[in-house]
Structure formats: structure tokens, C-alpha cells
Image (cartoon, coloured by chain):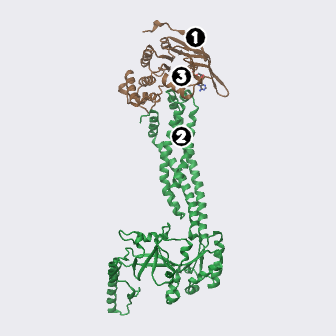
Chain colours: A brown, B green
Amino acid sequence: MIQLQAINKLYDLGVTKVEALKDVNLTIERGEYVAIMGPSGSGKSTLMHIIGILDQASGGTYLLEDFDITTLGDKEQARIRNRHFGFIFQSFNLFPELSALENIMLPMQYANVPYKERKQRAVRLLEDVGLAHRMHHLPSMLSGGEQQRVAIARALSNDPDLILADEPTGNLPSDKGEEIMQILEKLNQNGVTIVMVTHNPEQGARARRIINLQDGLITEETPVKEVTHAQ
Amino acid sequence: MHNEPLLIMLRRFTGRILESGLLILLVALGVGAASAGVSISLNSASYAADLRSRASYHEIAVSVPSQADTMEEPVIRKPTTDTTILTYADLSAAELLPAVDFAYIENPVRLSFVNEAVIERDAERRAQMEQIITSETAEDSKAEVPEGPPESMRMDAEDLEEAAQDSSIIIARIEELSGSSVSSEYFTSRALQTTFGSLFSTEDYQGTESVIILGHTAAQLLLSDGMTTGELIGKRLLTRTGYVTIVGILPPDGSSSDSRYYAPYQDTAASLGFTGIRRSSMGTVLRFYVTDEQELDATAEQLENWFTSQFGENQIVISNPKSEADQLIARNSSIGILMLLLSGAGLFIAAINVSHMLISRAMRMRRHVGILMALGSSRGSIRRLFTWESLGITGIGTLFGALFAIPLNASMQQAMSIQTDSWWAIALGAILSAVLILLFSLVPIMQYTRIQPADAMRNA
Ligand SMILES: Nc1ncnc2c1ncn2[C@@H]1O[C@H](COP(=O)(O)OP(=O)(O)OP(=O)(O)O)[C@@H](O)[C@H]1O
Ligand SMILES: [Mg+2]
């Protein structure tokens, strides 16, 4: 369970200060599927980064399983990102120097999974996203949709409890975006918590809850009826 | 490689071979120049210390001007040089000078050995001569027999055959050996002891027997198969002018005197014919050993005065090795310092450039750093990753730099006439400069110790 209490994020630009998040209170339960929506610049990515411990809040408390993560050192924070979180980005963020397989193996290296085991597991993950035949391809040889599926496989390599997806379909044509949405939905059905930023109201409606951000403030939380998408 | 983050670094390295090569070249140039500079200045300092500790540094040499010296002098003086003869008696000058601790006389000598090759060549030459003489006598009967020792003094094939039977005689494989005949103070001034045999006895200096002491290397040259060095003692050597007996062998001292031999200086010049004196006086050197180097200059001047009063102006040459060595040392140390400064500047420029290139490389890896951290890398392992890169570049560059410094250092030292060659000076210079470059290359690494992964990814 994630609890954000009065989270602030202030970007100090010297002359001006940008308040990207203002006293955000948010609770995300295990197994939830949350969509974060709002206009550009409203603080969606900032919120995702704070949840993912990729950035530090300027104020407020972040409790993860009732544990204040700001008290943790760099190494422990890295360990949480590695073992419990999976990130999916709008621009895929694969390493261009590594093959699809090696990209998926990398997070397991930080989890000290032996070479053979991480290779086997990476192959299985690639099969799961339907890209076994692209194993040794560099990202530059893959289409956008394929790259994003490799990125998802990479996010899943250490069996995360939480997937943080920032506009995962933003750079994809709608049919490829749909493939990604289906993968995420399937993951959620298997118990993985998903927090997704989207501009697409249709995609938002497929989550169980929509959080609307406006100028760093949560303006409304809409629980979506189970019936619209379940099973 | 079973480490994916390192694999990224490696592929970036090989994927930008031009940039990577340039980085390595920069390191190599910086390290090469700096280690040659360090080596040259260290070696010139140690060579200076070595020069000052040598016995020859403490010896003022007194000699008759050589033919080469008098060439530049007015022709009128030339005949006078022939009349100046330095003898053992002239060493008495030392008694007037309290700073002189030892004085000895030295005369260049040479042994010409007899062996089969020599006999064969002699026979050939004689045959040729006879042919010329007979053909010339047909036209002109005034042809002269070529110079050389009189026939009666020559050792010939018969002697060689005889000697071959005698196990106490050594037939040298070499043809010649240079040496010095020295008075006994030579050995005392250097506190020399023999490793085998003994030094010359008083009788040896009085001169009836031909005896010699061999330098370490010279002894090795005379060994026949299966013979130990010690077995040379008491053996006789067959030379053109008769037999000489080996009485002692000196320990190695690392200088050119190792390959020479020593004979007792027998002050019988006066009893030899007039020509004998003239010949021996040409190369005769009186050496005055002054332990206290502060006294060298003053003593040289006093010797100059004394010998001038004895023989007149310009009849003798006084050479003070201290002033010569000091000049060399002073020149070398200023070259050494200059080299150190220049190479230090080169290293500094290289280090700054390396740092700059690594920073720009690291800048381009900002996004990578962000993603790596998102995927579970701690700041520590990011730091380690970049440290590996720096170590790799510095390591390879240092290796090339050291290889490049070896010939650079050698040719510089040759130009400066420094005769020490210690690889450790290059190694020390290479390590020091590698450490400096590594320090500079750690700057970009430090940039990533504070960065937030979110910022790293956003600003890519
Ligand atoms: N590093 C930064 N320095 C200064 N201001 C920043 C920084 N990062 C974000 N901001 C500002 O914070 C606000 C929120 O940014 P954020 O990226 O969270 O918006 P967003 O909702 O994700 O927008 P988009 O839909 O365009 O991705 C914006 O006004 C942005 O300009
Ligand atoms: Mg955003």
C-alpha cells in the first residue's frame, strides 16, 4: 500500500519557483489499477517520479507498506526500485547498445540473478510479449510497439509489485497502443498494481480509478464501475 | 561479458572508436611525456650522485699535452713538448699539498697475444711483403723491411706449439687487451682488493717479472672452456713480447676498467733507451686523489703552479674532473628541470582534455544513468561503472605511454650523456601521471553522485 501525505514538489528556478505538486494526498491499495489524468504540465510525471522514488518530494510523507521511504539510504531505495517497481516510459528508454534480451537481463543483474538464470527468464519474458524471434535485435531494429513490449518485459524481469507507466502508448499508433493496454490489464488481473498516466479518456476509463490533476492539485478521484471492464 | 551495465560501457567504447582512440592517445601522450620527464630528471640526479662518488671525480690528472692538443697551439711550441717527461719522481708534488691523499702514475699499455689466427695472419702478411720486396728489388733495391718488433723478439709458430703443450700457459682467443701500468697507490686510493690472487708485491714494482692483474671482465675473456676464474691465478699468457703471469683478479666495479688489465708501473724509464722514455711519456698521467671535494679546485690550481714552475708555461695539462663533471651535472640538472616542467605541463593539458572529453561523454550518458537508476542501480554502482571506464582508458593509455617513454627517455639520456638506465624511474613517472589523470577523470563521475534519476531522464 502506498500512502502519500501532503506531498509537495517545488522546483526552485532561482527567479521563479514552480509548484509542481501541492499538498497531494493519495492512497493506492495493492492490486489497484489507477489512471492519472490531467492537462500537460499539471504534475503527472512529477507525481509518478515521486511514487517511483526517482525523485524526492520537497515536503510531505511517503509511506510504502507503512514505511517512510525518505528515511532510507540510496542503496535501499535502489533495491526497492529494482525488486518491487517496474517502469514503463513513453519513449521506451531501452539501452540502444544492448539487444532486446540483454535489456531485459539488466535489472536482474542488479538483483544478483546468475547469468544463466537471467537469460532463461529473459527469453521467457520475450516469449510472453511475443518477441522471441527478436531476441538479439538492437532496439533500433525494432518498431515502436515492439520496443515498448521489450520495455514491459524488462519492467517485469524482477516480478514487480507495482508498474508505473507514464503515457506508455503516447508514442504508438492506436492499434499498437491497444496491445500494450491489454498486456497491462492482464498483469493487473494477475495481481500487479498499476499506476498509469494517460491523456486518452478511453484508456483512463479502463482503469478502476481515475485521478485528475490540475496545476499540481488532485481535483477529483473517480472510481470507475467494475462492470465496464472486469474479466 | 556477464555484466550488462559494463557491456553498455564497452559497446559505447568500441562503438566510438575514434573518440576512444583519441582519449587513449591523449592519456598515452601525457603519461609518456611525464614519465620520460620524471625519469630524465631522476636519472640525471642519480647520475650526478654517481659521478661525484666515483674515484675518478676526485682525481686531478696531470699530463703532457697530447698531439691533438698541440695541433691548435702555435707550431713553435711543438718541439718543447717532446722534452717534457713526467716520471714517478714528479708525484712528489703531492707531498707539498696536504689535501692530496694519494698520488699515482699511470701509463697506457697493451698486450698483444699470440694465437693461431695471429700467427696465420703474420705468415700471410710476411709472404705478401716478400713478394713485394722481391718484385721491387728487381727494379729498385732500396725497399725497406716494414716496421715492427725485431724478428728475434717475436714469438712464432714454434713458441705457440710449445705453449700449447704446457698447461700452465694460456693461449688467449682474443688478440689484444688494453690496460694501464700503475704505481701501487692506484690500488690504495680505491681500496681495491683482489677476488682471486693478490695485488702486486714490492718486487713486482721493481720490475724483473712481467705480472698483471686482470679486471673482472678481462678475466672472463681469457678463460678457456671449463676453467674457473680462480684457476687463472699463476697462469702465464703468451704474448708477442713473451710471457706475462696473472697474479690477481679484481672484483667487478661496473665501469670500463672491468675490461682492462693492470701492470705494475716500473720506474725504469731512465734505464731504458731515450726512445723508450719518449714513448712512455706520451700517455703518462699523474693522478692526484683528493678525498675532500671542496679542496679539488684549490689543489688543481696549486698543482698548476707547481708544474708550471717545474716545466714552464703550457708544458703540461692539468685537468680537474670536478669542474668538468660539475659542468655536465649543472647542464643536465637544468635540462632535467626544464623537461620536468614541460612534460608536467603536457600532462596537465592532457589530463584536462581527458577530463573534458569524459565529461562530455558522461553528459551524453545522462539518460542512461537515469534509466540505470530507475532499473535498480544505486549511485555507488553508477560511480563504479564510470570508474571502470576511467580505469580502462587510463590503464591502456598508460601502457602505451610507458612504451613510448622508453625510447624517448633513452634518446634524451643519450643526448645528455647520462649513463644510468633505471626502468623504475619510468614506472614511477607513469604511475604518478596515471594517478593524476585518474583524479581528473573522476570529476565527471562525481557529477552523478547527486543527480536525481528523474532529472537525468528528463534532461536527456
Ligand atoms: N526539472 C524541472 N525543473 C523545473 N520545472 C520542472 C522540472 N520538471 C518539471 N517541471 C515543471 O513542473 C510542472 C509539472 O511537470 P510534469 O512533467 O510533471 O507535467 P506533466 O503533467 O507530466 O506534463 P505532460 O503531460 O506534458 O507530460 C511543469 O510546469 C514543469 O514545467
Ligand atoms: Mg509527463
Q: Mark 1 points at which residue?
A: A220
Subunit that carries the residue with mark 1: A
| Quadrant in which ligand 1 is drawn | top right
Picture coordinates of residue B362, whole percent (x, y): 53, 36
Cα distance, mark 2 to mark 3?
Answer: 30 Å
- Closer to viewer: mark 3 or mark 1: 3
Image height of B222 relative to B344, above or below = below
Q: Which mark is residue B358?
A: 2
Secondary structure of the residue carrying numbered label 1 = strand
CA distance separating discs 1 and 2: 48 Å
* Amino acid marked by disc 3: Gly
Is label 3 in a helix, a strand or a loop?
A: loop
Q: As shown in the figure, which amino acid type bears the numbered disc 1?
A: Glu
Residue B80 locus on image (x, y percent) = 58, 86
Q: How crowded is mark 1: few (under 14 residues within 10 Å), some or many (20 or more)?
A: few
Q: Dot 2 surroundings within 10 Å: few (below 14), some, or many (20 or more)?
A: many
Name the outermost residue toward the bottom. Answer: B141
Q: In this view, does A17 lie above or below A31?
A: below
Q: Can residue B305 be seen in this view?
A: yes
Residue occupying image coordinates x 53% and y 41%: B357
User: Residue B21: x percent and y percent?
Assistant: 47, 45
Q: In this view, does A79 lie above or below B172?
A: above
Q: Where is residue B118 in the image (x, y as percent from the top left)?
A: 36, 78
Q: Mark 2 lies on which chain?
A: B
In the picture of the structure, the residue carrying the numbered disc 3 is A52
Residue under the image location 59 percent in, 66 percent down: B52
Question: Toward the viewer: B337 or A206?
Answer: B337
Mark toward the start of the polypeptide (3 vs 1): 3
Say if labels 3 and 1 share a chain. Answer: yes
Task: Pinpoint the chain carrying mark 3.
Answer: A
